[in-house]
Amino acid sequence: MKIVFLGTGSSAGTPVIACYCPVCSSADPRNCRLRASILVQDEGVDLLVDTGPDLRQQMLHAGVQALSAVLYTHFHADHINGVDDLRAFNFAQMVVIPCYADGRTATELESRFRYCFQPPDITWAKPSLSMHRMASPQTFGGVEVTPIPVMHGHLPILGYRFNDAAYLTDLKTIPDSSLTLLQGLKILILDCLRYEEHSTHLNVEEALYWARRIGAERTILTHMTHDIDYATLAAELPESIIPAYDGMVVDL
Ligand SMILES: [Zn+2]
Ligand SMILES: [Zn+2]
Ligand SMILES: [Zn+2]
């Protein structure tokens, strides 16, 4: 199984439009962050997590040929607003693309993007998606996907476990019932917005706390703002914790 980091940025991306701070002006490509998303690949299975506004660019960069399914974490704009570009996969695969989400996110997607969830027409003039409520683990080929409920401030959203790896973006706390689903991880991918505290996201200090508590072999930080310079943060972290960068690939 392979995890491709398609985007490791927060809602604004890095660089931020009209910002000329040292990180936004940095020559280090690891400080260029598209909106947060990953692709999980395993022998003919291609699972996309979220469809942010940078989806087209991310699919082209990663050379994605087909999608088995799309898994949504939640309905915030930086995680859903690229949904129209899924139409390319309708054309390429000539099938309806299945999407999975919790009940609230599914309902939001169906109402905001109603035209995507109508019966398909053979011209694929609009994206053609099917929505499935995900409450229990699902298997896609050799990948077992377990939904992991986490709290994004007051909003319950989903992280996902893929065999021995988990992707938890946009969160402030993890309920005890979810911690039991995160035992024995090789890779934990974790929200890490910035240094300063935030009401709905983990900051660096909180990310380190949860990384220690969950105790994965390796923790990889994502969903970072322009507050975070890659090299500076990387130098401050313990050996088992690293920041992600766009295009990073992890083999499991
Ligand atoms: Zn987000
Ligand atoms: Zn900036
Ligand atoms: Zn969010």
Image (cartoon, rainbow, N blue to C red):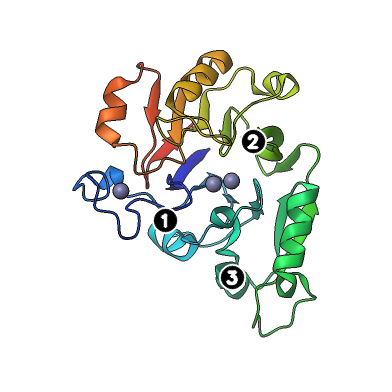
Left or right for 99, reference 25: right
| Amino acid, disc 3 | Asp
In-front residue for pair 158/193: 193
Q: Secondary structure at mark 1?
A: helix
Left or right for 114, reference 53: right
Q: Secondary structure at mark 3?
A: helix
Residue 57 point in image, percent of width and height: 42, 63
Q: Which residue is mark 2?
A: 153
In-front residue for pair 25/2: 25
Residue at 29 percent across and 43 percent down: it is 30
Nearer the observer, disc 2 or disc 1?
A: 2
What is the distance, in whole Å, between disc 2 and disc 3 at their CAs? 28 Å
Q: Which residue is mark 3?
A: 84
Q: Which mark is residue 62?
A: 1
Residue at 31 percent across and 28 percent down: it is 233
Q: Earlier in the sequence, mark 3 or mark 1?
A: 1
The yes-or-no answer for disc 3 within 8 Å of ligand 1 is no
